[in-house]
Image (spheres, grey):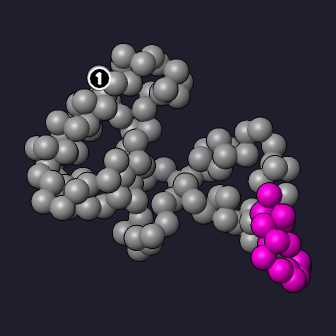
Amino acid sequence: MVAKPGLSANLYCQQLDSLKLAIDQKGPELANIRGVVFHQDNARTHITVVTRQNLWELGWEVLMHSPYSPYMAPSDYHPFLALQNFLSDKKLGSREDCENRLLDVFANKYKDFHESGFMKLPLK
């Protein structure tokens, strides 16, 4: 969920409550076994006391966005590290070669690749 300019913490909390209702209506299969793990950036409306209280009341685990990397979510590090390792000794001669290598990288990952990466994220 991306905050819109001028979005107040109270309105953001209303949106979170609506999201909770949608998850409840669509079924528990949208949440993992331990419940909802919610990721948001560190925009001002996302870090207010009102918002943190609302998230606590919803019972959601919050995966915060690192303040030192505004453009990359913590969950992005795992696939990019795998990509870096895969491409470290490769020479790419064309755009097509690059696209084919990228497809190879992610097509050949095991089924639980992304889930295992999430599980390796440090707890804060």
Q: What count of labels does the image hold?
A: 1
Quarter assignment of residue 35: top left
In this view, the residue in front, 46 or 101, is 101
Name the side, left or right, on which 5 lies relative to 76: left
| Residue 41 position in % (x across, y down) | 35, 58
Query: Disc 1 residue type?
Result: Leu
Name the side, left or right, on which 54 lies relative to 116: left
Residue shown at the point (60%, 63%) measured from the top left: 77
Residue 58 belongs to magenta span: no
Quarter assignment of residue 6: bottom left
Residue shown at the point (85%, 72%) measured from the top left: 97
Rendered position, 70 above or below 1: below
> Range of the magenta residues?
88-103
Q: Which residue is mark 1?
A: 21
| Residue 8 position in % (x across, y down) | 11, 52
Q: Secondary structure at mark 1?
A: helix
Residue shown at the point (43%, 32%) measured from the top left: 36
Q: Is residue 105 visible?
A: no
| Residue 14 position in % (x across, y down) | 17, 36
Local packing at callout 1 (Cα closer than 10 Å; few below 14, some 14-19, many 20+) is few
Residue shown at the point (41%, 48%) measured from the top left: 39
Quarter assignment of residue 10: top left
Rendered position, 32 above or below 120: above
